Amino acid sequence: MADIEKTLLDLDREELCSWVKEWGSPGYRADQILEWVYRKGVYEFEKMSNLPLRFREKLARDLPVTRSKVLDWVQSVDGTQKATVELADGEIIETVLIPEPDRQTLCVSTQVGCAVGCVFCASGLYGVRRNLSAGEILYQFLIAVERLAREGKDRLTNLVVMGIGEPLHNYSALTRSIGILNASWGGQFGARRMTVSTSGVVARIRQLAREPWSVGLAISLHAASEDLRQRLVPGRGIGTVADILEAGREYHLHKGRRVTVEYCLLDGVNDSPEEANQLASLVGGGSFKVNLIPHNPVEGLPYRPSRKHVAEQFRSVLDRRGVPVTLRRPRGEGVSAACGQLRVLSMEPGGHGS
Ligand code: SAH
Ligand code: SF4
């Protein structure tokens, strides 16, 4: 994996203070810089008018705010917007803004590709190329905030870590970016409005439960029976269904937040009433709610979304058994932007990422 040079967005307040002092400037300069970046959305040092000129020049040379850039934003008919972002080393990731009447949700990526390789997901098709840095994760947040402000839209209300990659395979950058997002000097974004989605890295779920902030947790289960789960989510280092749900229960206990079980309904694969019943037996008891996701077909993969009445039947089995359940409607189809399966477009021969 390439060694990505540090940018200002990778640093927390304390680290920035040290840099600033090392350069012979007073520590309060760090707060002035953070104010420009996180409060005013200004990334060019030449515009930071309350900083001395020489200091600004030095910053621009040695510690740019970011080395990422937005290549374009595209909008689907349902209003979902997808940003294609180019990273310093030319890798491409995507970030998706999902507007709804009562909230604005941002879906961020944490890796270039993914090592888990779920059989129905585009992100894992080519394995993982590298982790994103904390700054590269934060950048996605900042461009979304800027986009919404520029369009005069409502502010961002929710952030889901459900884009490209397995967030718990990039734990240190993930938790650093959550800390900065949440900080009063940083994003000022409430942890309770963030959700981390994982395919089931059990040890890291347990670690996340011990972190100081209460982010929401979503577990992408997709199967109730162990053999089916192993076929759909083949990645090594991912726990068994029983272990994952046990870790989910502990998370609920620690944080007092119900854990979401994500279940992508695949036609004829995991959508039988038997699977629904088995799932209901596993997730009953109040620690979980189930979110049924219609599959977004991926070119070259043989999976199709479940038929409407089958999905509805699956939902009603859970409902009858007292499990809180929602059936999500597809989003962002026009921009192939249901989170989690976007990267393939730029990985195709001749695309930016190849
Ligand atoms: N790697 C993490 C987070 C990113 S994927 C995880 O797996 O949880 C986010 C969600 O998108 C997961 O629930 C995943 O199963 C789902 N997903 C992936 N590909 C999809 C597709 N083609 N259609 C619908 N949902 C998909
Ligand atoms: Fe990776 Fe999540 Fe896609 Fe599975 S669903 S391959 S874990 S991004």
Image: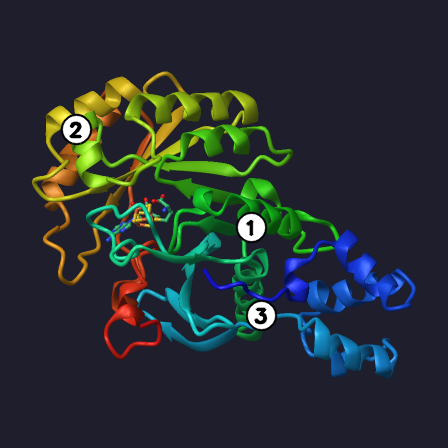
Q: CA distance from mark 2 to mark 3?
A: 45 Å
Left or right, 291 with reference to 250: left
Q: Looking at the image, is 126 positioned above or below residue 87?
A: above
Q: CA distance from mark 1 to mark 3?
A: 22 Å
Q: Looking at the image, is 256 positioned above or below residue 308?
A: above
Q: Which residue is mark 2?
A: 227
Left or right, 248 with reference to 234: right
Query: Amino acid type of disc 2?
Result: Asp
Mark 1 nearby-residue class (10 Å; few <14, some 14–19, many ≥20): many
Name the residue nearer the viewer: 141 or 93. Answer: 93
Q: Earlier in the sequence, mark 1 or mark 3?
A: 3
Query: Amino acid type of disc 3?
Result: Glu
Q: Quadrant of the N terminus?
A: bottom left
Name the residue nearer the viewer: 87 or 319. Answer: 87
Give coordinates of residue 162: x percent, y percent.
Answer: 40, 50
Does the beta carbon of the residue at mark 2 sit less than 8 Å from ligand 2? no
Q: Which mark is residue 146?
A: 3
Mark 2 nearby-residue class (10 Å; few <14, some 14–19, many ≥20): few
Residue at (78, 52) in percent of width and height: 14
Does the beta carbon of the residue at mark 3 sit less than 8 Å from ligand 1? no
Of badges 1 and 3, the one in the foreground is 1
Mark 3 nearby-residue class (10 Å; few <14, some 14–19, many ≥20): some
Residue at (43, 31) in percent of width and height: 259
Q: Earlier in the sequence, mark 2 or mark 3?
A: 3
Q: Which residue is mark 1?
A: 173
Residue 154 shows in this picture:
no
Give coordinates of residue 72: x percent, y percent.
Answer: 42, 78
Give coordinates of residue 273: x percent, y percent.
Answer: 12, 27
Q: Quadrant of the C terminus?
A: bottom left
